Image (cartoon, rainbow, N blue to C red):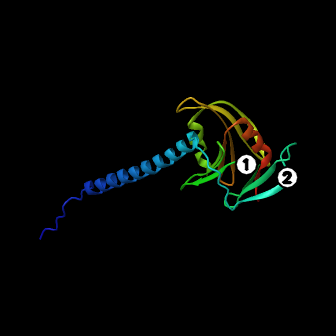
Amino acid sequence: MSNKQAPKSGIPFIIFLVLVTVLVGIWFLTKGNKVTEEIDQTVNQSVNQAQVINGNVEKTADAVNEEEEDLIVFQNPEYKFSYNLLANEAVKEEKSATIYTVYFNSDKLSILDENMEAAVKGAIAIQSANEVNIDGVTGEEITASSNKDGSQTKLILIKKDGKLFHFQGTAEFLTKIKTQFFFDS
């Protein structure tokens, strides 16, 4: 009796590995494209605002300037921040799987995972960057142009607790953020 075994071939295993690699690659590309599209939309989006004030906003008696205008405090317990704004400012919140955005008139705050900083910076051509401090947390104040359409933009990027706080808007808005935005403990 002859006990011959056919030589073992690794071809089925190699085909299996190639198939798994291709499927995993397609999955990552799909997920990566969705995140990139959300960032592009957040970085470049202009929104016409309707005044929406939700249950996270409360009146305060503080005065903003000599005109004694009423302030409201916009609070978000999930992301642990508050922002003092004028009572007549429009507020609109949007949330996706990876990005939370609050629009204050035409200005905005987007909160992303902190590892998305490179993607945000990759969408712009930085012209100047300076250190900025907001409520004891150091970040960057950036003047840049959009890589997409060349439009000028000003933004502040702050990393805190694994999140990237991305403020974008007018010089007046960014100046106000420096004194009227607070991280809650």
Q: Point out which mark residue 67 bears.
A: none
Secondary structure category for the residue under label 1: loop
* Element under disc 2: strand
Residue 40 image offset from top left, x and y in percent:
53, 42
Q: Which residue is mark 2?
A: 62
Looking at the rendered image, the disc whose residue lies closer to the viewer, 2 or 1, is: 1
Most foreground residue, 53 or 174: 53
Residue on which disc 1 sits: 88
**How far is disc 2 from disc 1 in space, using C-alphas?**
15 Å
Q: Residue at x 69, y 62 (%)?
A: 55
All told, the count of numbered labels is: 2
Q: Residue reaching furthest bottom?
A: 1
For label 1, the crowd category at 10 Å Cα-Cα, with few meaning under 14, some 14 to 19 and many 20 or more, is: few
Query: Given the image, on which type of amino acid does mark 2 rest?
Result: Asp
| Residue shown at 58% from the left, 41% from the top | 46
Residue 124: % across, % down: 58, 34
Q: The residue under label 1 is which amino acid type?
A: Asn
Q: Name the one closer to the observer, 92 or 18.
A: 92
Query: Residue 108 in the image: x percent, y percent?
Result: 65, 45
Residue at screen point 67% across, 61% down: 78
First in sequence: mark 2 vs mark 1: 2
The quadrant of the image that shows the C terminus is bottom right
In this rendering, position of residue 44 left or right of residue 177 = left
Residue 172 location (% of width, % of height): 74, 37
